[in-house]
């Protein structure tokens, strides 16, 4: 991980970290006390770790922490427990050779358009040839936003006029990618409430266009989640999963939230990998998710 991103991740998680560590530090007196375990429980709950995960973590700490211990020992144990919990959410991102399609979905304002540009920029850095697709045709501003981000990232964008059929934009983009040798097509979609059935069906339609043209569904169907919604991401994700069959998550806006702990129950409930995390608005504010680094950044300020 680049040093600058590590610093950003650490800074981005500072609110969650403070919420977790400050009450523990106040209660810590060199021993495993009931008070300390209670404070740990409260701190985890307020970081949105959720009751079931919290109980598991507190029980493990109660079992494994020696009666007399140092602050470092306490932190290392918590780090080990959280790291083990999140290890299963890590999946190194790789694409087959040939043309791949990444479909980005999510509720309004979760960070999809920004994430499409950031992931495209990241893939370019990995030596790929990304093409961005403005399949959010709902608002003119959404198209302009992706075009501008594409320019900033040095990436081409396929766009139609506002109101166009998103499936038709994707169709054109795939033809253009084939003709011009782009190897990853990143599809931005309109934000939608998971309760709106026609909009969810539209995602199914985009998926089918890709299937028809390439012989397989989009290689990745990625839910972009605003980390500050915490555990509310779980019901959202279940609806999107029904619509497109999700393959992974991107957690955005980890900076600026104290609810970063929701990563644990979200991952456990959904059983989906976290592909990237976002900690800011800039193109470089994105990194592949690594459990150990994430937990270290969360606990070691
Ligand atoms: N601080 C911070 N802001 C972010 C991050 N990702 C996105 N944003 C901001 O969040 C706002 C919404 O981001 P968009 O990318 O437009 O979200 P969207 O999901 O495409 O929104 P709709 O298309 O309207 O549904 C913008 O102001 C972004 O700059 C992040 O990781 N950190
Ligand atoms: Mg958008």
Image (cartoon, rainbow, N blue to C red):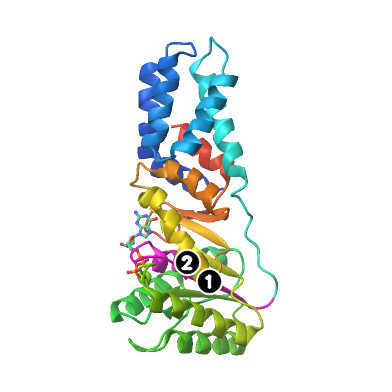
Q: Residue 129: which quarter of the image? A: bottom right
Foreground residue among 283 and 106? 106
Looking at this view, is 106 or 197 the one in front? Answer: 197
Asked if marks 1 and 2 touch (Cβ < 8 Å), the reply is yes
Occupied quadrant, residue 225: bottom left
Q: Which residue is mark 1?
A: 244
Which is more toward the observer, 25 or 244? 244
Question: Is 15 situated left or right of 298 in this image?
Answer: left
Residue 13 appearing in the image? yes
Disc 1/disc 2 C-alpha distance (Å): 6 Å
Q: Is residue 115 magenta?
A: yes
How busy is the neighbourhood of tag 2: few (under 14 within 10 Å), some, or many (20 plus)? many
Please report the bounds of the magenta region as a residue range: 98-118
Residue 254 at least partly seen: no
Secondary structure found at label 2: helix
Secondary element type, mark 1: helix
What x and y, as percent, mark residue 226? 39, 56
Question: Does the segment drawn in magenta span residue 136?
Answer: no
Q: Which residue is mark 2?
A: 240
Image height of 151 relative to 239, above or below: below
């Amino acid at each position: 991980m680049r040093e600058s991103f590590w610093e950003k991740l650490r800074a981005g998680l500072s609110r969650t970290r403070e919420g977790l560590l400050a009450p523990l530090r106040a209660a810590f007196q060199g021993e495993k006390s009931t008070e300390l375990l209670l404070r740990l429980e409260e701190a985890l709950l307020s970081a949105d770790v959720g009751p079931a995960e919290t109980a598991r973590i507190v029980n493990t700490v109660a079992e494994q922490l020696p009666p007399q211990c140092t602050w470092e020992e306490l932190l290392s144990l918590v780090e080990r427990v959280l790291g083990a919990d999140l290890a299963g959410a890590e999946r190194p991102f790789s694409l087959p050779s040939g043309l791949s399609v990444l479909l980005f979905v999510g509720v309004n304002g979760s960070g999809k358009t920004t994430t499409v540009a950031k992931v495209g920029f990241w893939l370019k850095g990995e030596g790929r040839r990304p093409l961005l697709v403005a399949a959010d045709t709902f608002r003119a501003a959404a198209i302009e936003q992706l075009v501008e981000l594409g320019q900033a990232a040095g990436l081409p964008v396929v766009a139609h006029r506002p109101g166009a059929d998103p499936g038709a934009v994707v169709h054109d983009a795939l033809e253009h990618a084939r003709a011009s040798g782009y190897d990853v097509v990143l599809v931005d979609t309109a934000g939608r409430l998971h309760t709106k059935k026609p909009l969810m069906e539209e995602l199914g339609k985009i998926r089918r266009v890709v299937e028809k043209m390439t012989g397989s569904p989009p290689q990745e169907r990625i839910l972009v989640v605003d980390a500050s919604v915490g555990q509310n991401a779980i019901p959202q994700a279940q609806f999107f999963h029904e619509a497109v069959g999700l393959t992974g998550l991107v957690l955005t806006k980890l900076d600026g939230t104290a609810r970063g702990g929701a990563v644990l129950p979200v991952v456990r409930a959904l059983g989906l990998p976290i592909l990237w995390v976002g900690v800011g608005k800039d193109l470089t504010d994105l990194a592949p998710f690594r459990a150990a680094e994430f937990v270290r950044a969360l606990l070691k300020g």
